[in-house]
Image (cartoon, rainbow, N blue to C red):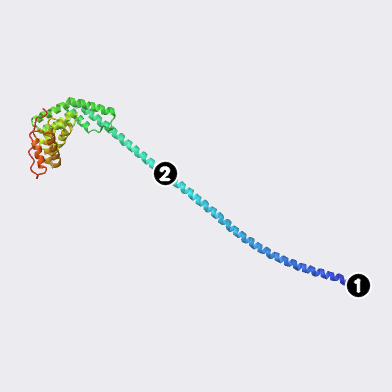
């Protein structure tokens, strides 16, 4: 019996030991599983946190990319709008310039057409009017703006005017000189004014200017006399009656209040014509230039110079 008990106890001890070891192993496994579960839970939390951060990062990246795209689109749109605006302004400027040029060309064409019509009227007056009335065409030619006429039209008008001056102008000049010799100042002024309006040659113009200025001076139209007398004095430095013209100029300027010009012409007459019969009057005027004002001397008598 003891031997059997011993034989039975020994396996039971082994079984008990294995049970204890199994139980301990189970406890260890359970503890390991609990630890693993805890670690898995931590890892899952970390993974969730990482995914959350990744999601935010991705969203921020998308938002940043979207912002860059929008900014680029706005910049491109702005550049295109600026370019379109500049192009529009350039085209509007070109249209304005072309319109201005077109208006200018229209105005020039209208001016040329008007000038051609005026030239035709002038030529008609110089060819169709009777007698000396044709001189109205010459006078009108002097007032005509020939810059817009063709070279051929200008030449035709000038040739016709020159022919009329020779044909009719000589008679007008002669009648003016004849009226001057009669001391008919109004007729002299009328005829010689008409003659000078024909734009005669310089030699005839200087002669007519002397007679016209003299007639105006004798008519006491001193201010009107200055222009033709100045033309004569400045145009013909060797004229026989230039000293007399200087005297009339001196007295005309003196009468209308141009004291400095009067003194200037007195100096020229005194220095240029030492043997002139009017030298005494030149000297008198120069003496009065520094003396108190005194009444001007009476105008000189008319002369038959140029007959």
Q: Quadrant of the C terminus?
A: top left
Query: Going by the image, does 101 lie left or right of 26?
Result: left
User: How far is disc 1 from disc 2 in space, using C-alphas?
Assistant: 121 Å
- At mark 1, the secondary structure is helix
Horizontal and vertical percent for residue 34?
Answer: 71, 66
Please name whichever residue, 261 or 123, is drawn nearer the observer in this view of the structure.
Answer: 261
Look at 28% across and 28% down and name the residue there: 151
Query: Going by the image, does 2 lie left or right of 156?
Result: right
Q: Quadrant of the N terminus?
A: bottom right
Query: Going by the image, does 17 lie left or right of 94?
Result: right
The residue that mark 2 highlights is 88
Look at 8% across and 37% down and name the residue there: 281
Numbered disc total: 2
Horizontal and vertical percent for residue 153?
Answer: 27, 28
Q: Earlier in the sequence, mark 1 or mark 2?
A: 1
Look at 72% across and 65% down and name the residue there: 33
């Amino acid at each position: 019996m003891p031997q059997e008990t011993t034989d039975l106890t020994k396996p039971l001890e082994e079984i008990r030991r294995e049970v204890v070891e199994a139980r301990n192993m189970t406890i260890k496994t359970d503890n390991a599983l609990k630890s693993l579960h805890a670690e898995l839970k931590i890892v899952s939390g970390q993974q969730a946190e990482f995914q959350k951060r990744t999601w935010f990062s991705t969203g921020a990246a998308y938002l940043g990319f979207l912002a860059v795209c929008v900014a680029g689109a706005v910049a491109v749109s702005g550049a295109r709008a600026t370019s379109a605006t500049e192009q529009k302004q350039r085209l509007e400027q070109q249209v304005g310039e072309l319109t201005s040029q077109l208006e200018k060309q229209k105005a020039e064409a209208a001016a040329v057409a008007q000038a051609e019509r005026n030239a035709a009227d002038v030529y008609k007056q110089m060819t169709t009017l009777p007698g000396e009335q044709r001189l109205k065409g010459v006078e009108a030619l002097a007032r005509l703006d020939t810059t817009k006429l063709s070279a051929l039209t200008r030449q035709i008008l000038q040739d016709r005017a020159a022919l009329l001056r020779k044909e009719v102008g000589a008679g007008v000049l002669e009648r003016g000189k004849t009226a001057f010799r009669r001391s008919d100042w109004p007729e002299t002024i009328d005829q010689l004014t008409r003659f000078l309006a024909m734009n005669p040659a310089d030699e005839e113009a200087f002669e007519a200017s002397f007679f016209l200025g003299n007639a105006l001076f004798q008519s006491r139209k001193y201010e009107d006399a200055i222009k033709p007398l100045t033309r004569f004095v400045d145009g013909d430095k060797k004229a026989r009656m230039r000293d007399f013209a200087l005297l009339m100029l001196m007295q005309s300027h003196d009468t209308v209040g141009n004291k400095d010009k009067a003194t200037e012409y007195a100096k020229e007459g005194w220095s240029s014509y030492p043997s002139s019969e009017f030298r005494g009057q030149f000297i008198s005027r120069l003496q009065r230039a520094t003396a108190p004002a005194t009444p001007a001397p009476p105008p000189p008598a008319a002369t038959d110079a140029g007959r």
